[in-house]
């Protein structure tokens, strides 16, 4: 099948040859014909060498998103092959595990498509116009392979506006589901797949919850940006005497309190609705003798930057929370810290932590390294697929 052709300007195509699927507007030389937004096109370099096929959208800075480096059609058989391959990988990694990410967009060579599985409920997010136009084929393949009870579209993110698409959420298949209890590492979490952040629950931290909790010890633990209480409740279950969770969203705190109740951990947990930066500043502005110290501190903030231009501000934000947190950490205590922006690489994140430690005149001993789980695969040629980085350090006074 011959697809319309887009030719690229003269330049280095190593990034594309390494498997990166994004082609930016400034790379395109000309079009063979007028194309409809969402069209499947083939891409060739300035020497007319074939590079791949993908979805064209003139409204987006990412003007073409490659879905294959072969000459093939995006019919139902194509989506069945791609989704089956993704499912096979997860089932090999997590046999019989009920909750995982089925499709992680570029990581599974389906740019613009995310699918999370919560038992027999699938929550789908679509961020590219080409994928939106072909979602019936996607849903057909998902039904055939995974046989879900319900498929929910959570297409309410601002990223859709960049592609010129409407924002909405709805049940696409099956009965409406507004409440589910998830078993995460032996703890029960109540979630609503129709509301909340992203697809309703952050699956990328589900294994790190337990790893961090095992390091926190038996004393007082502070969980900053606690959201629905993932790290806090795991720490309480692991033996922490008292856990304080800080979160700006009262709705998230209500969920955290409910989850504490479901697990019999209410007496150990205190979830406070507050601006974390302001709370840390107020606590560390007291005289040294009155500062409450913690045996373990967890920093898991939302992304501080969505683009390279904001990296400087993000680094200042990261340094601020680490500087304040280290002042509240007892000597010998553990700080577990995360960044979820691919623009902040591992070395850069480490350097910010080191700067904060130097300003506090303390030393840190590395205790653990964390990353996203294998159901959020990292592709070597696509650095954007590696976004979650974390460390645990012990404070040496």
Image (spheres, rainbow, N blue to C red):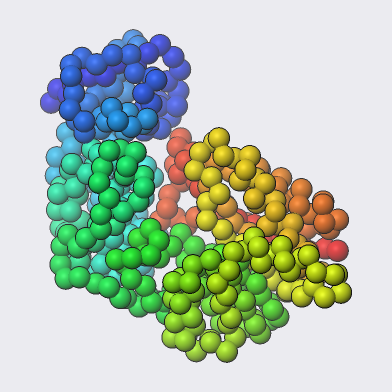
Looking at the rendering, which quadrant does residue 49 occupy?
A: top left
Badge count: 0
Q: Quadrant of the C terminus?
A: bottom right
Determine whether 314 is above or below 92 in the image: above
* Residue at figure coordinates x 76%, y 52% from the top left: 356
Percent x, y of residue 265: 53, 86
Q: Quadrant of residue 371?
A: bottom right
The vertical placement of 28 against 79, above or below, is: above
Q: Position of residue 203 (x, y in %)?
A: 42, 62
Q: Is residue 147 left or right of residue 188?
A: left
Image position, residue 208 (x, y; %): 54, 64
Residue 230 position (above or below residue 356): below
Q: Residue at x 42, y 53 (%)?
A: 376
Q: Quadrant of the N terminus?
A: top left
Q: Is residue 77 left or right of residue 16?
A: left
When the figure is inspected, residue 352 is found, relative to residue 259, above or below; the finding is: above
Residue 308 visible within the image: yes
The part of the image, by quadrant, that contains residue 144 is: bottom left
Pick the residue in front: 161 or 57: 161
Q: Is residue 203 visible?
A: no
Taking depth in this image into account, of 396 and 200 the one nearest to the observer is 200
In this picture, residue 16 sits left or right of residue 355: left
Report the residue at 29% width, 70% height from top: 119
Residue lying at 70% horizontally and 47% vertically, measured from the top left? 352
* Residue 142 on image: x %, y %: 20, 56
Viewer-side residue, 52 vs 27: 27
């Amino acid at each position: 099948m011959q697809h319309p052709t887009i030719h690229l300007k003269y330049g280095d195509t190593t990034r594309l040859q390494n498997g990166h699927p994004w082609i930016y507007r400034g790379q395109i030389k000309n079009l063979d014909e007028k194309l409809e937004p969402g069209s499947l096109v083939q891409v060739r370099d300035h020497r007319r060498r074939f590079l791949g096929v993908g979805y064209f959208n003139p409204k987006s800075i990412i003007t073409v998103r490659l879905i294959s480096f072969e000459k093939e059609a995006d019919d139902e058989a194509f989506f069945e092959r791609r989704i089956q391959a993704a499912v096979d990988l997860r089932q090999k990694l997590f046999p019989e595990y009920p909750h995982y990410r089925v499709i992680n967009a570029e990581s599974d060579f389906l740019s613009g498509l995310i699918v999370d599985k919560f038992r027999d409920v699938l929550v789908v997010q679509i961020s590219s116009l080409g994928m939106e136009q072909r979602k019936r084929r996607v849903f057909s393949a998902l039904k055939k392979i995974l046989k879900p009870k319900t498929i929910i579209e959570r297409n309410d993110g601002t990223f859709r506006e960049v592609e010129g698409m409407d924002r909405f959420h709805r049940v696409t298949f099956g009965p409406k589901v507004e409440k589910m209890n998830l078993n995460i590492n032996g703890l029960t979490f109540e979630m609503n797949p129709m509301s909340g952040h992203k697809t309703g629950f952050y699956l990328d931290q589900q294994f790190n919850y337990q790893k961090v909790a095992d390091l926190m010890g038996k004393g007082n633990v502070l969980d900053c940006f606690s959201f629905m209480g993932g790290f806090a409740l795991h720490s309480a279950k692991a033996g922490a005497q008292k856990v304080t969770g800080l979160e700006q969203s009262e709705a998230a705190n209500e969920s955290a309190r409910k989850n504490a109740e479901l697990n019999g951990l209410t007496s150990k947990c205190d979830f406070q609705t507050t601006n974390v930066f302001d709370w840390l500043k107020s606590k560390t502005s007291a005289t040294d003798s009155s500062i409450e110290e913690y045996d373990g501190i967890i920093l898991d903030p939302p992304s501080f930057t969505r683009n390279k231009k904001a990296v400087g501000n993000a680094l200042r934000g990261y340094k601020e929370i680490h500087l304040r947190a280290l002042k509240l950490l007892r000597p010998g205590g553990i700080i577990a810290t995360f960044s979820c922006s691919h623009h902040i690489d591992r070395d850069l994140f480490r350097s910010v932590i080191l700067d904060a430690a130097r300003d506090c005149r303390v030393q840190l001993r590395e205790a653990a390294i964390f990353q996203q789980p294998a159901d959020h695969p990292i592709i070597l040629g696509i650095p954007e697929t590696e976004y979650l980085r974390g460390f645990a350090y012990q404070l040496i006074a």
